């Protein structure tokens, strides 16, 4: 890695530091760095190692919350990237706390009583692997949709529902990885959200045993949409959008129409970002 010298005045020079290194070490303006000269080299290191291991914490008061609201608050805090979640709970929430913890990959329920629960991160994907986490999620979305045609018997449908549950857990984990990384590209958040919405509609149709005569076409469109994550091709997105509109106009199947509308909405959401490139600002 090379950097150009910047001359500030007659006697002072400066260099820029990689933003990735700054983020990895949780550095900010006015933080001190340690500089050491060694055999013609200048070694730059963090002068406050303790900060690298700081854990982010959130305190939640869920003592008067309905169970669904408590579930949502804890899960949202996990997705936001908090390492420790301290929650005041009520006795009616306590029986559900362990089940909530099972949905948070990499986190564990450290302690629980009638009035309090503590969740803590025990495992995290390293930053260099966080892009792999997202690639893995896209693959899981595609695999899940491909397995719809095999969900015919009660046993197969039960297996499909279990896979759907595991997929939702991995969605939470992937969104957490994006937030921990402080990902700036909004298309990644939007695509995860949109593909999850489509998969939820598909899973509902499978659960209701709904017949979908155009399923092969829907599956093919889903695969094309998921490929947009890798290609970012605006022209291809327009082609997919036209195909979706044509199918909506000819299908009389309500389940198919609902899935197609979700797909249409996905293209509408993603297209501005694909057209203008990665957006600045956090999602």
Image (cartoon, rainbow, N blue to C red):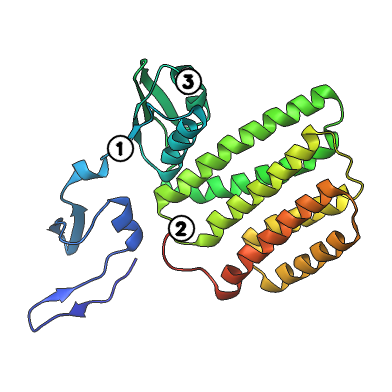
**What mark, if any, has residue 57 been given in the picture?**
1
**What mark, if any, has residue 98 been given in the picture?**
3
Question: In the image, is residue 172 above or below residue 272?
Answer: above
- For marks 3 and 1, the one nearer the N-term is 1
Looking at the image, can residue 129 be seen? no
Q: Residue at x 24, y 55 (%)?
A: 27
Counting from the top left corner in percent of width and height, residue 146 is at 78, 43
**What mark, if any, has residue 283 been given in the picture?**
2
Q: Residues within 10 Å of mark 1 (few under 14, many from 20)?
A: some
Relative to the observer, which residue lies in front, 66 or 164? Answer: 66
Relative to the observer, which residue lies in front, 165 or 59? Answer: 59
Tag count = 3
Q: Residues within 10 Å of mark 3 (few under 14, many from 20)?
A: some
Q: CA separation, marks 1 and 2?
A: 20 Å
Q: Residue at x 41, y 16 (%)?
A: 91
Q: Residue at x 35, y 36 (%)?
A: 83
Tags 3 and 2 touching, CB below 8 Å: no
Q: Residue furthest left?
A: 11
- For marks 1 and 2, the one nearer the N-term is 1
Secondary structure of the residue carrying tag 3 is helix
């Amino acid at each position: 890695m090379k950097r150009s010298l910047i001359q500030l005045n007659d006697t002072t020079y400066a260099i820029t530091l990689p933003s990735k290194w700054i983020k990895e070490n949780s550095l900010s303006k006015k933080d001190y760095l340690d500089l050491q000269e060694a055999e013609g080299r200048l070694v730059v290191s963090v002068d406050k190692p303790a900060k690298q291991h700081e854990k982010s914490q959130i305190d939640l008061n869920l003592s008067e919350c309905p169970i669904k609201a408590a579930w949502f608050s804890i899960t949202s805090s996990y997705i936001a990237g908090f390492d420790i979640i301290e929650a005041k709970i009520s006795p009616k929430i306590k029986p559900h706390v362990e089940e909530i913890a099972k949905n948070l990959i990499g986190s564990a329920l450290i302690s629980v009583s009638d009035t309090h629960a503590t969740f803590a991160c025990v495992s995290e994907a390293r930053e260099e692997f966080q892009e792999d986490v997202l690639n893995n999620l896209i693959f899981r979305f595609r695999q899940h949709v491909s397995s719809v045609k095999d969900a015919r018997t009660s046993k197969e449908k039960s297996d499909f529902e279990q896979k759907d549950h595991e997929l939702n857990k991995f969605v939470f984990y992937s969104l957490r990885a994006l937030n921990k990384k402080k990902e700036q590209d909004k298309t990644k958040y939007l695509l995860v959200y949109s593909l999850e919405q489509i998969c939820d509609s598909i899973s509902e149709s499978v659960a209701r045993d709904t017949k979908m005569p155009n399923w092969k076409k829907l599956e093919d469109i889903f695969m094309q949409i998921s490929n947009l994550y890798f290609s970012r091709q605006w022209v291809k997105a327009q082609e997919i959008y036209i195909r979706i509109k044509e199918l909506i106009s000819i299908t009389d199947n309500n389940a198919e129409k609902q899935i197609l509308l979700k797909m249409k909405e996905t293209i509408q959401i993603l297209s501005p970002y694909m057209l203008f490139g990665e957006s600045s600002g956090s999602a």
